[in-house]
Amino acid sequence: MNVKKLFGIIKVTFHTFVTMNLLRKILLPVVPVYYFITWLRNKMYDLGIKKSTGYDFPVIAVGNLSVGGTGKSPMIEYLIRLLREEVKLATLSRGYKRETEGFQLVKSSSTVKEVGDEPLQFKTKFPEVFVSVDSDRRRGIANLIKFNPKPDTILLDDAYQHRKVKAGFYILLTAYYDLYCDDILLPTGNLREPREGAKRADIIVVTKCPEDISVDERKRIRKKLNIEDHQSLFFATINYGNEVIGSSEMRSLEVFKNSSFSLITGIANPKRLVEYYDSLGLQFNHINFPDHHNFSEKELEEFRNLEHIITTEKDYMRLSGNFKSDNLWYQPIEMKFVENGEEFNKMIFSYIKK
């Protein structure tokens, strides 16, 4: 790839980042207004003025208080692996940035434009699971239970603020390096709703922790988060594989130590992945885009001139159809609990059986 063009992409991304940060600071006076609106909305649901629909079968909601970057997709995949052999399982996502509307059942032949990148990722990895999208989760659930056989457990992806649905069990995620207790509301901060919303969670998981996080550090975070008596706190890390996956084969990351490559990311926060590659001594150019970025034809044309590309799994869903060669790979990841993973599993099974 032409070095000048590469630095052009990086420069535009940097200027966009600086502009957005400046705009966020300017909009600080709007924060109290946003707080009041979101607080009032939650209070109306809490008091029953606004109605939530509950269900007589297990519905587990996974979400966060922050905008993106907490590891919702790895958590959904963890739950799928945990439950798929025990129950008839379905996932329901919004299908962010898809070009269709309403309810869609994701098929292996679906495209990112039809269903979104993460739902297509779920279906590709777990073809036996019902994977669906609908921005109206209540309508989505109504459609799912019409199937025969119908799913008996539904995982709601990124639905913590979707209060028209009353899930039976809530899992709240917060990233180790960006705890919700250290943040403020949009538009200056990244919180979608006030911190008090964390009280609705049954389980809180601090994600993307260092693998060697100390007991004292975990105690410190527990105190900061002010965990309620009815809640359980867990700590998890991201487990990166030692191999990347392409269209026809897997390749060890060791191979890339002898040559540089381009790392293309369109996720909320690629910090941990970049740190992981740095720790391996890999040489790479990092080309970063916003979360769920729709790559333009001009950008794709630039990428086709790159010798080797490694990307994230959900970015691979958007990029793979545009590359005919074998120079595109993705980095698989899995969520792994630092400790007490079995206790987490027991809580999930206990809820489903109850």
Image (tube, rainbow, N blue to C red):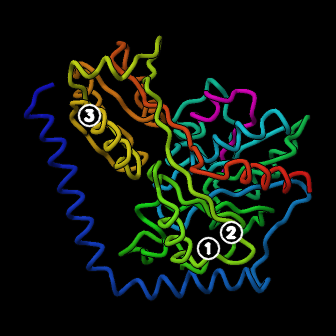
Structural crowding at the residue carrying mark 1, measured as other residues with C-alpha within 10 Å and reported as few (<14), some (14–19) or many (≥20): many
Distance between mark 2 and mark 1 Cα atoms: 6 Å
Counting from the top left corner in percent of width and height, residue 173 is at: 57, 60
Tag 2 and tag 1, C-beta contact below 8 Å: yes
Q: Is residue 82 above or below residue 142?
A: above
Q: Is residue 320 above or below residue 52?
A: above
Q: For this view, does 258 lie left or right of residue 138?
A: left
Tag 3 and tag 1, C-beta contact below 8 Å: no
Ranked by sequence position, the earlier of labels 2 and 3 is 2
For the residue marked with disc 1, what is the amino acid?
Ala
The residue pinned by badge 1 equals 198
Distance between mark 2 and mark 3 Cα atoms: 41 Å
Counting from the top left corner in percent of width and height, residue 54 is at: 84, 65
Structural crowding at the residue carrying mark 3, measured as other residues with C-alpha within 10 Å and reported as few (<14), some (14–19) or many (≥20): few
Counting from the top left corner in percent of width and height, residue 310 is at: 34, 28
For the residue marked with disc 2, what is the amino acid?
Ala
Q: Secondary structure at mark 1?
A: helix
Picture quarter with the C terminus: bottom right
Q: Secondary structure at mark 2?
A: loop
For discs 2 and 3, the disc positioned in front in the rendered view: 2
Distance between mark 3 and mark 1 Cα atoms: 39 Å
* Residue 133 covered by magenta stretch: yes
The residue pinned by badge 2 equals 201
Tag 2 and tag 3, C-beta contact below 8 Å: no
Q: Residue furthest left?
A: 4
Please report the bounds of the magenta region as a residue range.
Answer: 120-134
Q: Which mark is residue 299?
A: 3
Structural crowding at the residue carrying mark 2, measured as other residues with C-alpha within 10 Å and reported as few (<14), some (14–19) or many (≥20): many
Q: Nearer the viewer, residue 47 or 249?
A: 249
